[in-house]
Amino acid sequence: MIIPIKWLKEFIDVKNADEVIGILLKAGFESVKIQNAENFKGVVAAQVLKVTDIPGTGLKNCLVSDGRELCSVVCGAPNVDKGQLVAFARAGAELPGGVKISKKKIRGVMSNGMICSEKELGIGDDALGITVLKENLPLGAPLTFKKEESVDVEITANRGDCLSIYGIAREISFFSGKKLLNPPEFPEITQDQGTPPDFSIIREDDNCPLYRGCLIQGVTVSPSPAWIKEKISSLGLNPQNNIVDITNLMLFEFGQPMHAFDAGLITSKKIRISPSQKGEKIKLLDGTDYSLSENICLIRNDTEPVAVGGVMGGEKSGISPSTASIFLESAYFLPEAVYRASRIMGVATPSSMRFARGVDGIMVKKALMMAVHLIKETAGANSKVAGFFKEGKLPGRTPLMVRKKCVSSLLGTDVSADVMTKCLAQLGGVQSNEEGVFELLPNSWRNDLNIEEDVAEEIARFIGYENIPPRYPRIRRLPYGLPEGVMQRNSITGKLISSGFNEVITSDMISERKLFQKFTDVVRIKNPVSTDMGVLRPTLFVGLAEVFRRNVAHGLADIRIFESGSVFKNTSSGASFINEEELIAGMASGGIIPLSHYDCGEVDFFYVKGVLESVVRGFVKGFSAISAERINSPFLKNSFIFFRHGGKEKEAPQTDGRKNLPFFLIGEVPSEILNSFDIKKDYLTSSVVYFELYYKNFCAPASVEKKEYKAPPAVPAVQRDISVVVDESKKFSAVLEAVEAARPKYLYDIRLLDVYRGEQIEKGKKSVSLRLFFRGEGTLLQTDVDKEIASVLAILSENLQAVLREK
Amino acid sequence: MEIDREISRIRKNFFETIENIKTAEQLNNIKVVYIGRKGKVSRLLRGLSELPENLRPSVGQQLNILKNEIEAKIKETSLRFATSEETLSIDETLPGRPFFKGVHHPLNIIREKITEIFFSLGFSLVEGPLIEDDWHNFTALNIPEFHPSRDTHDTLYIEGEGHNLLRTHTSPVQIRIMKNNTPPLAVIVPGKCFRKDAIDASHFPVFHQIEGLWVDKDISFADLKGVLIGFISRMFSPNLKTRFRSSYFPFTEPSCELDIGCPICSGSGCSTCGGQGFIEVLGAGMVHPKVFRNAGYTEKYQGFAFGMGIERIALIYYGIADLRDFYNNDLRFLEQFG
Ligand SMILES: [Zn+2]
């Protein structure tokens, strides 16, 4: 809220905006100074020496002196007169709104500048008359019209009591120890003589515990006096009329929202406060028609809604120039009810903002009296208070118990009884019947003090947060640190990074358009930031493709990126259960090593497969990805999912049904998809390969094999190479499986050396060369190895009709 | 015995001579002179058979020892004269075999730095779901449905029944942790959060937070200050000023915000700190009794919670002006942090 410093100074002695900002910052409110920078230049003080009418134009030719020269200026203002000190814009001056003043002929008369009005200078609303300077300025002095300084304060949601000039002064006083000046005197006004009013209040909604009002007859609606206008303007608002301005004054000065009805339009002469029915309609002062949901507190002209309680008045019963009697409402609405109405209707007003945060109950009456007093002063001699009305009462408050021991424990510092007494005395009425135990009845405006901890905060603020000595950790628990899952994820991202992949972070919310209708069960956002962020990603592909596109556009060709994140999908239809799954996905293209004079392959399917196999081997010893399934994956061609299985450690737990869990997916991004994502192909030097790593499936504790220590073998391994010729249709996995099926006792590793097709091999066949590694407890005998190879060859021949190729 | 003297004379001569050689050629000559086929030692070895039988084993052994010593010394000395042919054959200024090294995302680098500090203080790490329900994200944290404190959370809701939403902060994980654990507990919770913010240099609808929670019987505001001052001094600098300011969060009481002296300008005022010399880094406070109650605690506990934006810390740490850079993932930007 805007706090004009001049206004604030009526209640507390502060130097300037900077001091206020500093105190409020410590008190917990951030604020900024509103700079009222000069927005005109080249305007100086000048004296009007002579005024002559320009016949037939209503304009005047004025001779002014700016101390340097005499200028003749054409002026249309009725109030210009000889001898006045005026604001003179010389030719070349700049006025607000980018207006540049130059010499020009007006109605045939040369005008060498302009005598300015308040409006033209942007310092007021008066557009008709020129500004007559009151100060005794030397001629030619550049003019500076400084508006009063003000600060814009952000009040936290718990402190409705600070949403007023007086409230801020009170808070500054609490916080800085400065005395509150000139506490306002609220008049006691009584009904004027006359016939008792034929008017009544019926309160049927407990969301309005207290409703007060005053009927004033014979009012004249007119512009407010200058001092009220000035105050309203200093808030950045436009003054309207005496009635509206005075209610605004009460709201901004004392935090009590009020509403003035044209009493003549309350035709039933009954104000009824009752909850809304679903579908009831009302047009409010903002000119909008609202269809209400149920249980919103309405103020009615008997049955017809005329205002939404605590939020805004209706258009129909508002004050107009012809209003002759008013009903002034000052009430207490429950915070939650007003906030609910404001949220549901989507209307936030200065009034709803204050009620929602809690207003000072005592002020309901006081501000009403003050407003009535001011209206009587400004609304003409005939205005009469026809009657005061009151229904209901303020919600009661119970005292709080505040214990020195508890406050000290919470703050971690010993708070003295003396400090407590001093602080509590400022917060409300205090009683202490027992050493160190206080009963506090908080001041009426402190709606935020409800539990002992709330008071502890006030005591901490009173002491100063900076004066509570810090205490360094002494955590009484066993060390724990990282959960296994996070540790494993970190280890995987670390491996990908050392393999040359860069980690990226993209938005979880993406454009549904980018999914090209390839996904069902997409999770949509009800109120998205924009359609570009309309759905939760069902795949990491889209975000990665976008990053890829951007980097290719920058001319990069060697790109390898990955992201660790969640994907989302709606599970079973109807139920609102959403599945959120973490995985790692990546994309790669370009050279395997940076461009150099060394041999360098390009990224392809098998490069990525190698990286992923090595990642998995960190968790599943000896894993090789031979169990795969070709799948139809959105955005990809030649895409395969690889499963557990394979891996030398056949004793790995397979009983838990995890055998067929997918470990990763690899696929190539076809050129039409690159096109769809606007990825420029000109720069690319290799295929673009995408992968997804379902790390939870191989990291989950159950599947992680314990790494058992084995002494390194005492004897070196024996190596043997064999080459077998098999049918082209036999996959490498079949060869491996056959070797394993022979259950060789000493064989511990197999490497593929070569796959050869060519002249020396029958068409439709291929030669597969393997290097077998054998190891035993002691030195292996030639015959042991020969026996194993023979059995391997036998199975290869039996299962795959493989033939040993002579070397 | 003469043969013994002969052996020690050869040894003496050899070791004297070899100390003075200057070239590989000289070394080769010495090799020939001593252990070459017609060398001094070889000659003696050949002459063994002429010695009386009882002397042969001991003399033979001595000669072998001498031969080994000479061979070892020659080998050692030869290292001084690397063969010039090999030296000339490589251009050691050619580039090494290059390989790609990736980098962590700067936000994750900062996350790791932060979590490491809290691990060292005894905190553990917990994660929570991104999609939350209204109760965990708001109600349980003492943010009732119709309370103005909801205004600061521009919440993104999920379509469909069930009032699911994208968590607006990491605080709901506080509730999840406390529901399943009894104090003492000290945890940090890093993770993504979401708000319906318009994108600009300091706002992005996706952002990262780290939540902290330490609950025991007697954890106080003084502990809160100690932990956070400790964190700041390790994260930035031990000399950095800290300033605790009063604030308001519905789920803590008392609440505070922590400002640090601007590490960019050391407090003299710059664009990072908006000329203030101080930068707000996090919000914190003593866990509100209602939060304990909503988490199901019936015993009395005391503790604090804090939450900080990882982006904010990263912007300050690196002096980055525009938060959008983190989400553009321009590799030329990211690579600078690896
Ligand atoms: Zn700075």
Image (spheres, coloured by chain):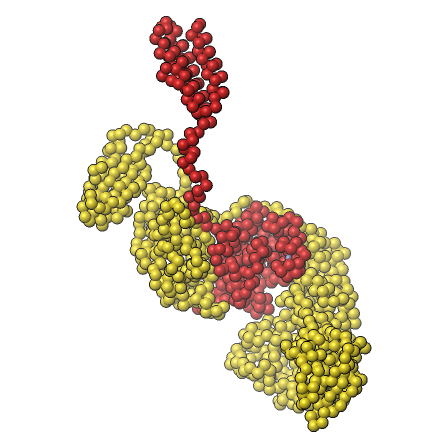
Chain colours: A yellow, B red
Front position in the image: A473 or A768: A768
Whole-percent x, y for residue A282 in the image = 56, 83
**Which residue shows up at 79% across the image and 79% down it?**
A134
Q: Is A578 above or below relative to B219?
A: below
Q: Is A217 above or below relative to A347?
A: below
- Name the outermost residue toward the bottom: A56
Whole-percent x, y for residue B222 in the image = 66, 52
**Which residue shows up at 56% across the image and 51% down it?**
B114
Q: Residue B178's image quarter?
A: bottom right
Left or right: where B295 falls relative to A187: left
Q: How many marks?
A: 0
Residue A150 shows in the view: yes
Front position in the image: A284 or A10: A10
Whole-percent x, y for residue B12 in the image = 48, 14
Split into quadrants, the picture shows ligand 1 in the one at bottom right
Q: Residue A740's image quarter?
A: top left
Residue A251 shows in the view: no
**Which residue shows up at 69% across the image and 86% down it?**
A110
Q: Is B285 above or below relative to B75?
A: below
Which quadrant is the N terminus of chain B positioned in? top left
**Which residue shows up at 37% across the image and 15% down it?**
B38
Left or right: where A48 falls relative to A521: right
Whole-percent x, y for residue A517 in the image = 37, 67
Front position in the image: B169 or A276: B169
